[in-house]
Image (cartoon, rainbow, N blue to C red):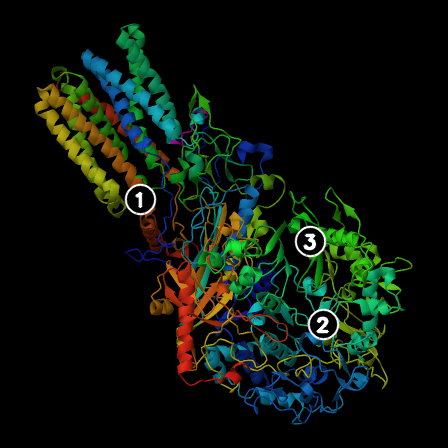
Amino acid sequence: MSTMADPTGAPAAWPDTYGDEAKERMGFFTDTSICIGCKACEVACKEWNLVPEDGMVWTGESYDNTSTLGANSWRHVAFVEQNEPLHVDGDQPDALRWLMSSDVCKHCTHAACLDVCPTGSLFRTEYGTVVVQEDICNGCGYCVPACPFGVLDKRHIPRHSGDPPAEILGLQLGKKEDGRVWKCTLCYDRLKGGHEPACAKACPTDSIQFGPLDELRERAGQRLEKLQAENWNGARLYGHDPNDGVGGFGAFFLLLDEPEVYGLPPDPVVTTSHLAEMWKTAALATGALVVGVVAGFLGGSR
Amino acid sequence: MGSNMAENHPVGFQWVLEARERGARVFHVDPRFTRTSAMATDWIRIRAGSDIAFLGGVVSYILEHDRWFDEYVEHYTNAPVIINEDFVDTEELDGLFSGWDPEAGEYDVGTWQYAGMEVHGAAGQREEGFKPTKGEGSGHGGHGGGLKHGEPPEEDPTLEHPRCVFQLLKRHYARYTPEFVAETCGCSKEQFLDYCEAICEASGRERTGAFCYAVGWTQHTVGVQYIRTAAIVQQLLGNMGRPGGGIVALRGHASIQGSTDIPTLYNILPGYLPMPHTEAYGDFESYMDANTSPTGWWGNFKAYWVSLMKAYFGEHATAENDWLFEKLPRIDDDNSAYWTTLQMLDGKVKGYLIAGENPAVGNTNAKAHRLALANLDWLVVRDLVEIESAAFWYDSPEIESGELKTEEIGTEIFFMPAAAHTEKDGSFTNTQRLLQWHWQAAEPKDDCRSELWFYFHLGRLIKQKLADSEEPRDELIKALRWEYPTHSQIQEPSAEAVLQEVNGWEIESGEFLSGYPKLKDDGSTLCGCWIYCGCFQDGINQTARKKPHWEQETYVAPEWAWAWPANRRILYNRASADPDGKPWSERKKFVWWDAAESKWTGLDVPDFEQDKPPDYRPPDDAKAQDAIAGDHPFIMQADGRSWLFVPQGLEDGPFPTHYEPHESPFGNPLYRQRANPRRQQFERPENPYNPVDGEPGSELYPYVATTYRLTEHHTAGGMTRSIPYLSELQPAMFCEVSPELAAEAGLVHGGWATIYSTRSAIEARVLVTDRIPPIEVQGRRTHQVGLPYHWGTRGLTTGGSANDLSPIVLDPNVHIQEVKAFSVGIRAGRRPRGKALTEFVDGLRAQARERREQAERVEPESERST
Amino acid sequence: MSTTDVGTNMRSYYGRPVLKEPVWQPEIPFYFFTGGLGGASSVLSLVARWTGNDLLAQRSIQIASAADAVSPLLLISDLGRPERFLNMLRVFKVTSPMSVGSWILAYSSAASSMSAFLNTIGRLRHVAELARTASAVSGAPLAIYTATLISDTAIPVWHEARKELPFLFGSSAIASAGAAAAIAVPPPQAGPARRLAVGGVLAENVLFKLMEKRLGMVGEPYSKGEAGRFKKIAAGCTLGGAALLAGPGRRSRLAAAAGGALTLAGEVAVRWSVFKAGFQSARDPKYTVEPQRERQSARSRTAPGTGAGSV
């Protein structure tokens, strides 16, 4: 039924609706200061989740040929080459640094995709993560522009042979494409089996850390302190704050520059935060429409 | 240095990051800023091919500023040893050492010997002195020599004698000043000095530092000497045999260490026993004599040999028939990969078997290899997919250009699909000599078969066919022990049974042996590889132990897998204790002498005879390991010391010397001898060389190219360019150039470039980046071109092969190709196609030749080839 | 080469979008049109009935029914999995304008088609009138909710215009209903229809301008690319159509039809302009990043204790 976003900072409908089955909220802390850009996360995710290949396009954008998250890329390693020092330590005229960061669905506390999904396909799991039920999704695509991070997308590849398009009245209603929206599930099936997600497992340097969200937030705070003490250039946390525009991310980051440098929005706000205002405006406009039509008859019914 | 660990060993690299997190300084010294540099605390840019200049400068700094670890150097290295009075250094001979024979093109190492030692004359004479073996003939060790007492005849413990190794070292590197380093390597003096200080600070009793290297060091005509220079640095700083020290080789394949231990090299047998040679060794006695060292563990050579013969031939090898020695095949030539390829080009090789390798893309001058394969009568290729080496006859640049025509290629090709590592049991042996077992997870599909299956059944079938043969040449085949249990529908042989054989057993009792000291030379023991003996001790597959390190007592974690020899994790670890057997410091204690128990003990298996006290001094007639004193940790060496100066075993000098790469835009700033005089050159029509610095024509190939790997692909691409998940991560061949080079050559980022040498030309997408900056060397600026070498014509992502551009010119000691520094030209746009390609390449080559012939030679022909 | 400055000091990841463009196909802007037409026509039909203009009432409910019949087909066709269209009615979610709207459309279609059918065959009068009322009650929100739907996304040109879009869509709906009725009804009885068409056109053109102005930089898509072109077409067609309706359309059936058709074309163009603007707004990262950066800087200026190290 209705899933209004909860202003108190917890994701809506969790953990209450789960009762006894609710688990600790799990998430990711991606510490990009130790990411070596190996892309094991991208490959492990694809292998575990049978995500299809996403296009053989050489972009020339440093070593990033994946470019963006999407229906067929659930982990995306960004590469940014900068003429900047890694540490702020005196004069370094020829400094070079290479930022590497593995992006993923943020599993927002207040998730716009979940809020706008009309079929109830998107739901919040007992772990507090956000998952698309692919047997319900009908590809309406509403979640796609709703996400402030541009995570979700529709899968255009041909359907599997075992899943033929439906026929009604002899007409082929179904399209040839998969047509549904796909995104990171935080390896829901692996969590149920007591394992960590594939990307976290594969990450050789533990840049991707998985665990209970509060623990991760604490660890991240300490990590930031250490980096700041060591004068790391630009170190900051992104998405750790439960008071931010999406109520804090379930998958948050330690970045070394502004979010937009990595292709991330600096100050994302879940669109649902203005829901009340929008419905109010809709009501007013509806009223205005009725008034307007009536006004058209004021000069007589002819 | 010479490596890119984060990109090529990402899992191992996590430990480097752990060290960094704890405050270690991580220096990445490299021509490019790679993903490793991004993680390092410091990146020092140097020119590709100048590492010896850099490290030699470090040696000089250490000696200059008295930063060497005195007690260690005095007792554990051959620093005090006095060298033959006829020895002359490169400083006096303008880049050559004494003993150079220009006719033969090689060194007579007689003058490099320790003073007071004669060089052995005939075989079979037990005199003091070293056998004149070098390169691979030296058997990968400092053995084959003979020293009474295990002590050199003349030494100066004060290190002051003008001909002691220490002083020779000082003189040899005197001109490798910080200024020289900055000028020759293109780095800044400040960075260099900072580096020297840092590694000196990180050494001594309380601290150690390590080097990690890979093919950035080995793939040079002075590759072995690169590593030698680091070895000198580490010996001076006292970092060998100590925890956190050493020189770590980052291997290119999961089990390439294993491929030399149980070798796939033509000139050695399991455990580095030398292959018998038609000329060098004569009869069995002479062979034993030549290879049995009077001192050190090689003194038990015969036991290792006989046990191996029992493994091969079982009851057929007996003391009476000298363990079938006379029947064994002998090598009579260099049969290394490149030499064999050249023989193929000359039509002298009939058949070839390629297994898990792709020379048509992965070997230097890949084009020559494709032409060579077309000259065979038959070729067998075993791989996961139909790689370029199997498809060259219809799909290759030469088919496109018309240089080869499918219908004219006489090679009959058998492609035998291979099973992947997940489809079979087996072990990997890694750089730490760790044997790690893995189990089969899935059955191979269709006709795919493992290596073990293939060779076992091949041998079985051959034996079957020859069972009734009376021919003498078939005797050995018939004598082969060839019984392994098989299982599963396809009759897969038991890998564990093979491991058991490698470990060996006492023949009568069948008991598995616990280590190589148990091997006998009387035929009562059987062992497939003496250094692996113990991997199956107590009948347990020791290599399959998987206890995680957090469940073990110490960080050494000896119960994970099994390291050869004897599960020893750090070799020469006796050096982690001082001459009296006490740890250098509490912090760095590793193994030590327990006086109460009268034995060596510690965190690791001591690499020393357990009950030999530190104050043991060998009697005059002591043999083998008994001839090594209690304070000499380097027990595989004849004198128990680590060698700063290498009197025998190397083709190209007892000290590393800065030589320019074979193809370089720069001359040698120190010596008249430009490049390694001993490098192996094979100039011929299929393998032309670019003109070098100063020579007219060199301006046509003015840039330094270097080849390398990316994380996303593996070597020649057979394993990765057929997988969509990896191919999409790096879906095109590209070159890396600086903005300055792009401007100079008119290259557009994201566009195409054609890169060319006298060998061939390829095309690549252009990635303009600041990470491969131009270098200022000897007052001149030049550019470097970065080339990943993964691509070929097959697979989901295809592209030009970087190795089409590189020359066949090899390190003389181990025949490794120089692909880390060679010269190229570059221009914008895609390459010419079809015949136009060869016309383009040949045209430039002809132009270069013309210019060279017209002008006076910088390097006269006779010197050019030396 | 690494980071891109886009005009200002804004930084981006190789100039790539931060958001994803909608995956909606051309069916959707046409649906905005048919939904508005159908919804407003239902209301028009009811008011016409109340004021005794039965012909206008009948034509309008027929128009509403036709539009409401096409609307679901357009939506189903746009789905990635059309055979799962019934999943739209699995839940009723107030946080999802698409969920609410699907229910509204379902009721509205049922009501308007029932009313039109019964009205046309002249049977079950009371049921027909009830159905007409139901249709109007659901029709009004039907014409508006699609504006809420697109406002309720992260797309800046839509979300930041959440105050104006519902009124814009409402005006456009009124204009469409009026124009369509003016074609279907002879001029003597089409007075209110003409008035609604002209009034709607004027209101919508003013609203569009106001919205664009208030959006500032975020409204830039309306002056560029396809969104800009459609907007120009919309202005021309709607104003031209309104002129025809207000002038010769009062006497000439032909002029009225022409004016009505032109107006309808203009309304389609309005929906297309808004639709395309969303794509353009998602495509250029500056529309997302710059306002957020400004908002954040403003926040940290007024609250200096927020400290470095957090974003």
Q: Residue B515 carries which label?
A: none
Using the image, name the chain to which the residue with label 1 belongs: C
Q: Give the range drawn in magenta.
A: C88-96
* Residue labelled with disc 1: C281
Mark 1 Cα shell of 10 Å, populated few (<14), some (14-19), many (≥20) = many
C127 vs A30: above or below:
above
Per the image, is B158 magenta? no
Q: Which of marks 3 and 1 is in front?
A: 3
Is residue C51 among what the camera can see? no
Taking the view exactly as shown, the residue that stands out farthest to the top is C123
Q: Which of B88 and C271 is in front in this view?
A: B88
Between the C-alphas of marks 2 and 1, the distance is 64 Å
The C terminus of chain B sits in image quarter = bottom right
Per the picture, the main secondary structure of the magenta-coloured stretch is loop
Q: Is mark 1 on a helix, strand or loop?
A: helix
C48 vs B410: above or below:
above
Between the C-alphas of marks 2 and 3, the distance is 43 Å
Using the image, name the chain to which the residue with label 3 belongs: B
Between the C-alphas of marks 3 and 1, the distance is 58 Å
Q: Mark 1: which amino acid?
A: Ser
Q: Do labels 2 and 1 share a chain?
A: no
Mark 2 Cα shell of 10 Å, populated few (<14), some (14-19), many (≥20) = some
Q: Do labels 3 and 1 share a chain?
A: no
Residue B156: x percent and y percent? Answer: 71, 92
* Residue labelled with disc 2: B589
Q: Is mark 2 on a helix, strand or loop?
A: loop
The N terminus of chain B sits in image quarter = bottom right
Q: Residue B451 carries which label?
A: 3
